[in-house]
Image (cartoon, helix red, strand yellow):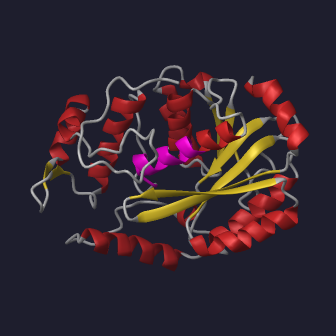
Amino acid sequence: MQKPTKKPARGAEKTNLHPRNLHRSSYDFERLVVTLPALKEFVRPNAFGTISIDFANPKAVKCLNQALLKEYYHINYWDIPDGYLCPPIPGRTDYMHYVADLLAASNGGKIPIGSAISGLDIGAGANLIYPLLANSLYQWTMCATEIDAVALTNMQQIIQKNPGLDKVITLRTQAHSTHIFQGILSPNDLFDFTVCNPPFHASAEEAFEQSSRKLRNLKTKNPVLNFGGLSHELWCEGGEKLFVKRMILESKNFASSCFWFTTLISKGSSIDELGKFLKEAGVQDLKMVEMSQGHKTSRFIAWTFLNKPQQKEWRKQRWM
């Protein structure tokens, strides 16, 4: 595993983040400005006199992400088109660490690392964040899927402008909006895990209200949609529950192609119903992992169709 060159500056420790998360301390803006001088334009004291940025300003948040990715994850070029989702790096990093723990729990407590380990990101989006973090943290090889042509072009640009990423991150186009694994996975594919940040909302109105609520919480004086996200990134008919049910049903058709299928779940109220649905689908093992970032609790569910002998053979062939 690639080690960071430096540890983040000490500050009020965010103990709810994963123990291996590099962002448990407050952002060291002085250091980040050295890494990316363009960030200086957005750094100033907030209402409490603390050096920070305006998190309601999309340009400031994107610039902060660029600095974090360059300083801690060796990504020298990263950008997203206007209007696309700008992901919070600490929370996205947590998902990768907990996936690593999930693999370790199936491997005698040892995290499988290196390019032989392969992950699939469903609907990666223009930001390509999970493949970038997964490769930087654990040297995993990643495949990213997407239906949006603009997002795919942007991901390809990120890969091309960071030497070496073309050898460890590949892209696949999903041609059908109602398909998830179908049209992506082939009979010869083997993935150790999948990740997904599904469209959480059931309608454009619900997505708008959620974004507006975020802005009200930040007490911005100019309430505009600064958090980004196009329709297919934020909502789908039936919301995340229906999306994940489709994912579960399709994963059953590729039961031997992947060890752990995982996806984020934004609403805790969905867990019991999805857990029942998974058991009815015949999964061999099911886990729910809770994560916490600030005042927000998130979670992901993981399932596998491999029985114990099949899991043992998978470890022997791929992880040892």
Q: Image quarter for residue 142?
A: top right
Prevailing secondary structure class for the magenta stretch in the rendered image: helix
Q: Position of residue 309 (x, y in %)?
A: 90, 38
When the figure is inspected, residue 102 is found, relative to residue 53, above or below; the finding is above
The question of residue 184 being in magenta is answered with no
Q: Image quarter for residue 296?
A: bottom left
Q: Position of residue 143 (x, y in %)?
A: 66, 37
227 or 153: which is nearer to us?
Answer: 227
Q: How many marks?
A: 0
Left or right? Give the position of 8 relative to 44. Answer: right
Q: Position of residue 315 (x, y in %)?
A: 79, 30
Left or right? Give the position of 169 relative to 284. Answer: left
133 or 126: which is nearer to us?
Answer: 133
When the figure is inspected, residue 99 is found, relative to residue 190, above or below; the finding is below
Q: Position of residue 221 (x, y in %)?
A: 19, 72
Residue 269 seen:
yes
When the figure is inspected, residue 309 is found, relative to residue 301, above or below; the finding is above
Left or right? Give the position of 71 relative to 273. Answer: left
Please name the residue shown 29% across and 74% down the image: 216
Q: Quadrant for the C terminus, please.
A: top right
Residue 170 seen:
no
Please name the residue shown 64% across and 31% down the image: 110
Please name the residue shown 79% across and 63% down the image: 278
The question of residue 91 being in magenta is answered with yes
Please name the residue shown 44% across and 73% down the image: 210
288 or 222: which is nearer to us?
Answer: 288
**Which stretch appears magenta?**
85-98
